[in-house]
Image: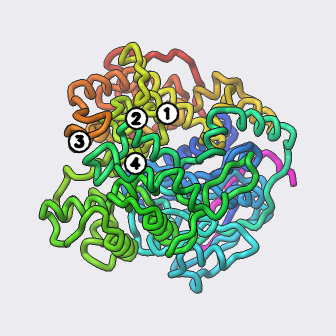
């Protein structure tokens, strides 16, 4: 069924159990498009500085974009909030059937804004543009699979035991745990509101079929399309191992001698089926394990395999399935267990743990999800939480409180800049220069390296405003302008490029208001130690070179030396009337950056 171009928002107050509809300001739609950008604008507007992420006043947004459910690739939604893990802005993306059904359920609404805290567990049911809160007392305690199965006629996004117990990196799961809005603890915020699930009952959208088919063909012929059909993200472990940037045994080594046992070929041999039969929307490999079937992504063998020194494919898949059902971020869970192993080896904690021990890892992951032991309780607050309790700050690298993910930046120094400046903490999805640098690409100057990182960050920020599958990037040379025109929101490519930069800068202003500055863009201490083996053997990040690169990054963006956007930059991007008195905006202490485009205020 066709829908009108969405321009409204559902506002849900869990305290009063009310659901209301409001119009999104047209100026906001123009300036931020949707998804990440619009969610960031609402979060900045709704929250006061230093709001506790688990307080009723924190907002949790479930955002779509103006072309959600229409474009090829996998549909996604954005979960946007203030992160309990980092205290910074958080956007996390979930795929599968839920965003398609949500787009068909919301009608004229582009998203949902949730505040408050219910006095009992509730579920939010969405259909035909309306929402209502119902009791979820019967489902509290269910894992992700059981919760989704409780609503067989709908698509569900839910929390599991990890979110109910306040683990700071709990996810929001859908399709029984096959898909997650993963990093940073959006599921924790959802649990703090006693919101067990969102249930979408609408049918997927079906308009603009001819345009979609053309883009499907172009995507299928792109490098990303061919790669996804062949291997999805599971091939990242093979790539990272080959070039020597695979974080192994708690970030001590750059290659894993058991990588081939848990990589793409092992998945092909063990898969019972592909998640989707339609090759125009590539899907992952479905694997049976002793913990139930699951669809492991690239992070699963990286952090739960190489990261823990486990080379048994069945064991790695089972650990991933446990995290999926508990609705627990696999990356931080794996890094938390790796921290515990290294802390045990160094005598920091009194527990007998070792790399390669599947049973010990399985027990500790369950302890984390339920906080049932002192070690599990500390690790439930993330790596930095465990460090505050026990020490061991030099064991597992974190940025802004979030542990590093898939690639070791010591084998690709430009990746270090991408991690350090990521808006939500150590995230490889904001920019991935490692994929070029580790294969031998070099940039002629440091300014060119900075431009590469900034360009990727801005481009992905824009794509997540639309919201489209970011693997679709190769087929969107116009940054989505044709699709936006088709739904009645015309932009030219230059205007869309400015949207990406505007959104990235607004989020930096949010983080600056929360007290983040240059010190939080620093590299973690483990990155200063050399990698132990492989093609990057002996590589480490030079602190002086990194600081110089960070200086150039700030200048390029038009931020001051402490990483704060200057007045000139704020004015140029149309953010002058947005910034509140709690956000420090300095005068320029030099050139305002390399950009000269103009933009009007959004209000």
Q: Quadrant of residue 496?
A: top right
Tell me the residue that label 2 is attached to: 418
Query: At 36% from the left edge and 40% from the top edge, which residue is drawn?
Result: 245
Q: Earlier in the sequence, mark 2 or mark 4?
A: 4
Tell me the residue that label 4 is attached to: 405
Structural distance between the alpha carbons of marks 3 and 1: 30 Å
Q: Are marks 1 and 4 in contact (CB under 8 Å)?
A: no
Q: Nearer the viewer, mark 1 or mark 4?
A: 4
Q: Quadrant of the N terminus?
A: bottom right
Main secondary structure of the magenta stretch: loop
Q: Earlier in the sequence, mark 3 or mark 1?
A: 1
Vertical position of residue 195 compared to residue 285: above or below: below
Label of residue 535 in the image: none
Q: Nearer the viewer, residue 594 or 585?
A: 594
User: Residue 48 in the image: x percent, y percent?
Assistant: 43, 52
Tell me the residue that label 3 is attached to: 532
Structural distance between the alpha carbons of marks 4 and 3: 18 Å
Other-residue count near label 3 (Cα within 10 Å), few / some / many at <14 / 14–19 / ≥20 = some
Q: Is residue 330 visible?
A: yes
Q: Earlier in the sequence, mark 2 or mark 3?
A: 2
User: Residue 169 in the image: x percent, y percent?
Assistant: 41, 61
Q: Which residues are magenta?
A: 1-18
Q: Nearer the viewer, residue 554 or 387?
A: 387
Label of residue 457 in the image: 1
């Amino acid at each position: 069924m066709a829908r009108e171009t969405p321009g409204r928002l559902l506002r849900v107050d869990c305290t009063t159990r009310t659901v209301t509809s409001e119009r999104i300001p047209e100026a906001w739609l123009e300036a931020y498009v949707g998804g990440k950008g619009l969610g960031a604008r609402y979060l900045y507007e709704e929250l006061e500085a230093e709001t506790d992420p688990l307080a009723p006043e924190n907002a949790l947004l479930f955002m779509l974009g103006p072309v959600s459910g229409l474009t090829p690739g996998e549909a996604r939604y954005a979960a946007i909030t203030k992160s309990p893990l980092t205290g910074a802005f958080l956007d996390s993306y979930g795929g599968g059937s839920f965003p398609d059904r949500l787009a068909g359920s919301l009608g004229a609404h582009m998203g949902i804004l949730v505040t408050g805290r219910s006095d009992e567990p509730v579920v939010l049911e969405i259909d035909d543009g309306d929402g209502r809160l119902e009791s979820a007392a019967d489902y509290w305690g269910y894992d992700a699979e059981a919760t989704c199965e409780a609503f067989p006629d709908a698509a569900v996004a839910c929390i599991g035991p990890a979110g109910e117990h306040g683990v700071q990196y709990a996810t929001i799961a859908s399709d029984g745990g096959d898909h997650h809005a993963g990093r940073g603890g959006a599921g924790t915020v959802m649990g703090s509101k006693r919101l067990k699930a969102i249930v979408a009952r609408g049918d997927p959208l079906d308009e603009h079929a001819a345009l979609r088919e053309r883009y499907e063909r172009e995507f299928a012929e792109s490098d990303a399309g061919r790669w996804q059909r062949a291997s999805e993200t599971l091939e990242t472990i093979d790539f990272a191992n080959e070039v020597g940037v695979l974080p192994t045994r708690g970030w001590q080594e750059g290659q894993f001698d058991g990588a081939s046992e848990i990589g793409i070929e092992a998945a092909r041999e063990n898969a019972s089926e592909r998640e989707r039969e339609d090759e125009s929307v590539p899907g992952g490999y479905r694997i049976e394990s002793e913990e139930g079937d699951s669809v492991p992504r690239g992070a699963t063998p990286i952090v739960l395999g190489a990261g823990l020194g486990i080379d048994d494919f069945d064991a790695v898949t089972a650990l991933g399935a446990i995290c999926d059902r508990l609705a627990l971020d696999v990356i931080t869970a794996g890094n938390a267990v790796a921290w515990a192993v290294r802390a045990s080896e160094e005598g920091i904690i009194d527990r007998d743990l070792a790399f390669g021990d599947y049973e010990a890892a399985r027990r500790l992951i369950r302890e984390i999800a339920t906080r049932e032991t002192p070690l599990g309780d500390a690790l439930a607050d993330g790596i930095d939480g465990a460090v505050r309790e026990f020490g061991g700050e030099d064991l597992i690298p974190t940025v802004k409180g979030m542990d590093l993910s898939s690639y070791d930046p010591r084998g690709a120094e430009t990746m270090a800049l991408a991690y350090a400046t990521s808006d939500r903490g150590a995230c490889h999805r904001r920019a991935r220069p490692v994929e070029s640098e580790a294969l031998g690409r070099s940039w002629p100057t440091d300014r060119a390296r900075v431009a590469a990182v900034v360009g990727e960050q801005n481009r992905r920020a824009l794509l997540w405003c639309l919201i489209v599958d970011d693997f679709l990037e190769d087929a969107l040379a116009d940054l989505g302008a044709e699709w936006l025109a088709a739904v009645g929101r015309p932009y030219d490519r230059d205007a869309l490029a400015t949207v990406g930069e505007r959104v990235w800068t607004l989020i930096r202003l949010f983080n600056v208001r929360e007290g983040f500055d240059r010190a939080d863009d620093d590299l973690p201490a483990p990155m200063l130690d050399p990698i132990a083996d492989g093609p990057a053997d002996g590589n480490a990040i030079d602190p002086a070179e990194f600081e110089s690169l960070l200086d150039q990054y700030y200048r390029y963006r038009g931020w001051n030396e402490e990483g704060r956007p200057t007045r000139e930059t704020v004015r140029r991007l149309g953010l002058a009337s947005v910034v509140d008195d709690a956000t420090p905006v300095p005068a320029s202490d030099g050139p305002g950056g390399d950009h000269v485009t103009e933009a009007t205020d959004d209000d």
